[in-house]
Image (cartoon, rainbow, N blue to C red):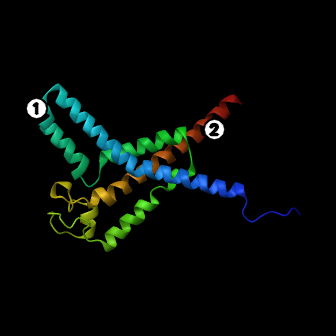
Amino acid sequence: MPKTLPISKRSISHWVRSGLVFVTHQIFATEGVIWLTVLGAFLLRRSIAELHEGWAESALMRGMHWILTNTPFFPIQISLGAYLGWKLSLRWPHRSMLWVWILPGVFLCYAVIWIPSFSPWSTSPQTGPLSHYFGWGCQADYRCYDQLTFTEPFYSSIAYSLGALWASRNSKDLRRNDASIEK
C-alpha cells in the first residue's frame, strides 16, 4: 500500500486556487454588478445630456434613478446579475458560482436581526426590520442606504448564481443533444 501524505502540495494549490476563484466570483456577483449598473446609468445620463441637456433632467431620467436606487426589489441589478452569471458561467464555469449568495445572505440576516438601521442619519420613517430591509421603509432619497448595503448585494448574488445554474443546465442539455445527434 503506497504511503500518502495527508496534505499534498497539489491539494493545497487546488484549495488556494478554488478560494481565489470563489472570491473573484463573489466580487463579480456583488460589487461588480453594482458598479456596472452605476456605470451604465452614468453613461446613459451623460449620453442623453450630450443630445439635449433638458432630457437629462426629464421625468424619464428621474424614473430611472427611482428604479435604480429607490425600489426595494432592484430589477436592473437582478437582471444584470443573472446575465453576468450566465455569461461568465458559459465562458469560465466553476461550481463556486452557485454559492456566492451565502456571504451576502449571512450579512443580510445579521443586519435584519441585529441592526435596526445602519444609516443613523436617515430621515426614513421608522418601520419594522422586514419593511426596512425588504420593503419601502428605507429609500436612498431619505439618505437610508441599508438596502443598497445589504439587500442589493444579496439579490444580485442570488441572480448571479441562478444565471450560472441556468447556463450550466443549458450547456449540459446542449452536450446531451449533441451526443444524441452524433449517434
The residue wearing badge 1 is 54
Give the structural element (helix, strand or loop) at label 2. Answer: helix
Q: Residue furthest front?
A: 9
Report helix, strand or loop for mark 1. Answer: helix
Residue lying farthest bottom? 114
Q: Nearer the viewer, residue 99 or 144?
A: 144
Q: Which residue is mark 2?
A: 176
On the picture, is 68 further left or further right than 34? left
- The residue under the point 87% across, 61% down is 2
The quadrant of the image that shows the N terminus is: bottom right
Residue 92, x across and y down, in percent: 55, 41
Q: Which of the pair 120/131 is nearer the observer?
A: 120
Q: Give residue 51's position: percent from left, percent from top.
A: 17, 25
Q: Which mark is residue 174?
A: none
Q: Quadrant of residue 16?
A: bottom right
Query: Would you place residue 87 above or below residue 101 in this image?
Result: above
Amino acid at dot 1: Gly
Q: Earlier in the sequence, mark 1 or mark 2?
A: 1
